[in-house]
Amino acid sequence: MNKTFVGRIGFRYTQEIRRPEPKWAKKLLDYSTCNISDGMDKLYTMDCGIRQMFPSSRFAGPAVTVKVRSGDNFMLHKAISMVQPGDVLVVETQGCNAYAVCGDLMVSCMAKLEVAGLVVDGTVRDIETLREIGMPVFARGTVCGAGDKDGPGEVNFPIACGGVVVNPGDLVMGDDNGVVVVPQDDVEAVIAGADKKLAIEAKRRKEIAAGQYVKGGLDEIMRAKGIIQ
């Protein structure tokens, strides 16, 4: 990757990320994550293990990506020093569910810095206080134990979260249904795809209201597959 960074592979960070225009994150909030997933042909959708830790508002914003060592959160602290209002912190923990990557102290700092949301492929803790803070938090669950603060790790390099590759600056969106990742150069096409699917769904709702409860065209599909004559 052509970027200037501090450190070395495995223990490095960069502040040189390209964020999309703020209007695109705002535009995504007009849709659900289901709509946006449809606009990407169901790809770029995090698996169901990445779930909302408590009821919270829909969010969307550019990703600040964090890769931490299993059981450590040192580089998440560094990432907090680099966020801008509206960013979404997305954290890869190397599959660690035994130690929380953060709790109420770190999340309170994120909220004060106007981070739009936190997505962790791992666990968090202090859930009672996180609810009070109210900033959207998605993770695989909660655990009592805290991690170390030694490193290594990386900030603003590609990571994997919920089965999806997340690049710094990609638009990350979450709501009651889950989390989707929109590659920032594709956001207009994704929104157009979502609108197209919504139009199809609106037509189907009218059919249901008119009493057509079985989706049309099923036999035609089966004939095309050679199942029936």
Image: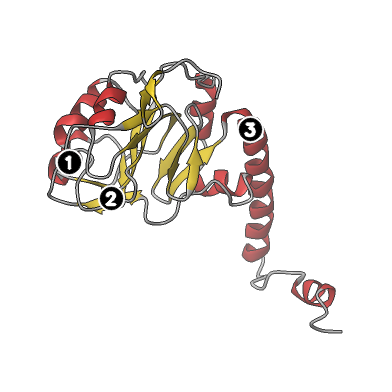
- In the depicted view, which residue is nearer to us: 22 or 170? 170
Labels 1 and 2: the sequence-earlier one: 2
Disc 3/disc 2 C-alpha distance (Å): 31 Å
- Looking at the rendered structure, which numbered label has been put on residue 96? 2
Is 5 located above or below residue 186 in the figure?
Answer: above
**Amino acid type assigned to the residue bearing label 1 in the image:** Gly
Residue annotated with mark 3 = 186
Give the label, 3 or 2, closer to the camera. Answer: 2
Query: Picture quarter containing residue 148?
Result: top left
Residue lying at 65% horizontally and 41% vertically, measured from the top left = 195
**Amino acid type assigned to the residue bearing label 2 in the image:** Cys
Residue 29 visible in the current orientation: no
Residue 105 is left or right of residue 27, and the answer is: left
- Looking at the rendered structure, which numbered label has been put on residue 147? 1
Residue 197 is left or right of residue 12, and the answer is: right
| The N terminus sits in image quarter | top right
Labels 1 and 3: the sequence-earlier one: 1
Classify mark 3: residues with Cα within 10 Å, few (<14), some (14-19) or many (20+).
few
Labels 3 and 2: the sequence-earlier one: 2
Q: Position of residue 137 (x, y in %)?
A: 29, 41
Residue 95 visible in the current orientation: yes
Residue lying at 47% horizontally and 15% vertically, measured from the top left = 4
